[in-house]
Amino acid sequence: MTNKNLQRQAIVEEQKKKQTRTFLIVGGVIIALVLVFVLSKLLTAFTPRSEFSLGDPNAPVKVNVFSDFRCSHCAEFAENQEDQFIKDYVDTGKVYYTFINHPFLAADSMDAAVAASCAAQQGKFKEYSRELFSRYTEPNAFTAANLGAYAQTLGLDIDKFNACSADSATRSYINKGMLFGGKQGVTGTPSFLVNGKVVYSNALIQTVEAELAK
């Protein structure tokens, strides 16, 4: 074989190697992007649980409330406005209402959210959350001992409550709810997601009525 043929063959083989490397690099990038996309969906997938909801799931308006148990405005809404809202819109079949923990204000906000979630598993979410909101200004209200004491006062099974509190799945669910809220545009509490639109409490009724009018 002549030198020219050898050179030509070498060039062809080098081109094939480059094409193979390019193919592998592009393929690797595509696979990595697909994995990132799939993992992000799995990590942020969030479906609110029924124990945090009130009303008819088929109601024309869906309202999610994002709340932190250290939030003064959240406490004010829960104590002074929520019952009337439930009476006017949830009990009448107009709104499906769901609470989503959004503990971001203080270090013990997550501890309170976990405890409330565990109370919800025993059908006592409203009673327990109101207990927490009534104590939001107390520095030591959300210690493990006090959170357990509130559970006992409400007659919860304390062994189940403690097991739930220690279960990493409980915090994982709350974190997914926070990620969900962030993706919807929630930046503070209380925030309300009304059929996909984020509003604050001063615009809640107006927004719900506008959705019902549609």
Image (tube, rainbow, N blue to C red):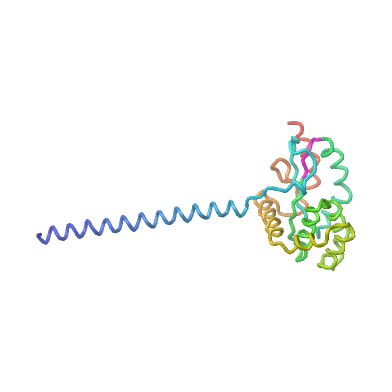
Report the residue that reaches farthest toward the left: 2
Q: Residue at x 76, y 33 (%)?
A: 212
Q: Residue at x 87, y 65 (%)?
A: 138
Location of the C terminus by quadrant is top right
The image shows residue 76 at horizontal and vertical percentages of: 86, 53
Total labels: the figure holds 0
Q: Quadrant of residue 31?
A: bottom left
Q: Residue at x 28, y 58 (%)?
A: 17
The image shows residue 92 at horizontal and vertical percentages of: 84, 35
Residue 213 highlighted magenta (yes or no): no
Q: Residue at x 73, y 42 (%)?
A: 194
Q: With 106 as the anchor, is 137 left or right in this view? A: right
Between 178 and 154, the one lying in front of the other is: 154
The image shows residue 60 at horizontal and vertical percentages of: 74, 35
- Magenta segment boundaries in residue numbering: 93-97
The image shows residue 181 at horizontal and vertical percentages of: 69, 51
The dominant secondary structure in magenta is strand
Location of the N terminus by quadrant is bottom left
